[in-house]
C-alpha cells in the first residue's frame, strides 16, 4: 500500500544533536529510542538512483523493505511503500504494485547489489502543533560502503498527520 511521505531532513553536527536533545519542547515528551540498520540496493550503474530508493531495514527481528519514489527532484513529498519481508535481500515480488515495478527487468533483478549500509541510533519524539502531528527524529550514526565510512548526524521532521 502506498502512502505519501512528507519530510524535511537537515544535516547537523553531533553538537547540534546534543543541543536539540536538550530542547525544552522535546523534553516534555518521552522519546522513543531505537537502533536501525538499513541496507540500500541498486545496480552497479546506479539504475535506481535518480528516481527510486530501495532498502531493507533491520528493525529488531523484522526486515522491512521500503521503496520510495520521487528521487531528489521531489524530496519533500514522495511515494513510499513499506512491507515486511523475510531475509536480507529485497523481495521483488512485493514490488509489483510500486514505483519500482516498471523497472523490474531480468537485467535489473540480476544486477541488484547492496551498495551501502547505515547504522543509526534514532531518538524520535512526537510533536503536535496547530492540529498537525510531526515526528521529530534525531539520527546519529554512520554510513558504510565497502571499507569507507562517514558519520551521520541528522534532524528529520516527518509530517504524520495534518498540514
Image (cartoon, grey):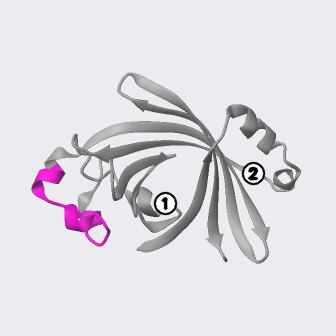
Can you see residue 108? yes
Q: Residue furthest left?
A: 106
Residue 163, position in %: x, y? 66, 76
Residue bearing the label numbered 1: 75
Q: Residue at x 63, y 69 (%)?
A: 160
C-alpha gap between disc 1 and disc 2: 26 Å
Q: Residue at x 28, y 56 (%)?
A: 91
Residue 79, position in %: x, y? 43, 68
Residue numbers of the magenta segment: 93-109
Residue 138, position in %: x, y? 67, 46
For the N terminus, which image quadrant? bottom left
Question: Could you tell whether 120 is left or right of 46 in the image?
Answer: right
Indicate whether 69 appears above or below 34. below
Q: Is residue 105 magenta?
A: yes
Can you see residue 88? no
Q: Quadrant of residue 140?
A: top right
Q: Is residue 116 magenta?
A: no
Where disc 1 sits, the SS reads: loop
Residue 89, position in %: x, y? 30, 47
Of circles 1 and 2, which is in front? 1
17 or 114: nearer the viewer: 17
Q: Earlier in the sequence, mark 1 or mark 2?
A: 2
24 or 87: nearer the viewer: 24
Where disc 2 sits, the SS reads: loop
Indicate whether 140 appears above or below 46. above
9 or 131: nearer the viewer: 9
Q: Residues within 10 Å of mark 2 (few under 14, many from 20)?
A: some
Question: Could you tell whether 130 is left or right of 141 in the image?
Answer: right
Residue bearing the label numbered 2: 31
Q: Residue furthest top?
A: 147
Q: Residue furthest front?
A: 73
Amino acid at each position: 500500500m502506498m502512502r505519501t511521505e512528507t519530510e524535511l531532513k537537515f544535516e547537523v553536527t553531533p553538537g547540534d544533536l546534543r543541543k536539540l536533545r536538550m530542547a525544552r519542547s522535546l523534553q516534555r515528551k518521552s522519546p522513543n529510542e531505537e537502533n536501525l540498520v538499513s541496507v540500500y540496493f541498486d545496480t552497479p550503474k546506479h539504475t535506481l538512483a535518480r528516481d527510486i530508493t530501495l532498502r531493507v531495514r533491520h528493525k529488531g527481528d523484522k526486515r522491512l523493505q521500503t521503496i520510495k519514489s520521487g528521487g531528489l527532484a521531489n524530496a519533500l513529498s514522495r511515494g513510499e511503500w513499506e512491507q515486511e519481508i523475510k531475509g536480507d535481500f529485497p523481495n521483488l515480488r512485493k514490488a509489483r504494485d510500486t514505483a519500482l515495478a516498471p523497472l523490474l527487468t531480468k537485467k535489473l533483478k540480476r544486477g541488484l547489489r547492496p551498495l551501502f549500509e547505515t547504522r543509526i541510533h534514532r531518538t524520535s519524539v512526537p510533536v503536535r502543533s496547530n492540529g498537525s502531528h510531526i515526528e521529530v527524529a534525531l539520527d546519529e550514526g554512520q554510513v558504510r560502503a565497502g571499507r569507507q565510512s562517514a558519520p551521520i548526524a541528522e534532524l528529520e521532521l516527518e509530517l504524520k498527520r495534518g498540514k
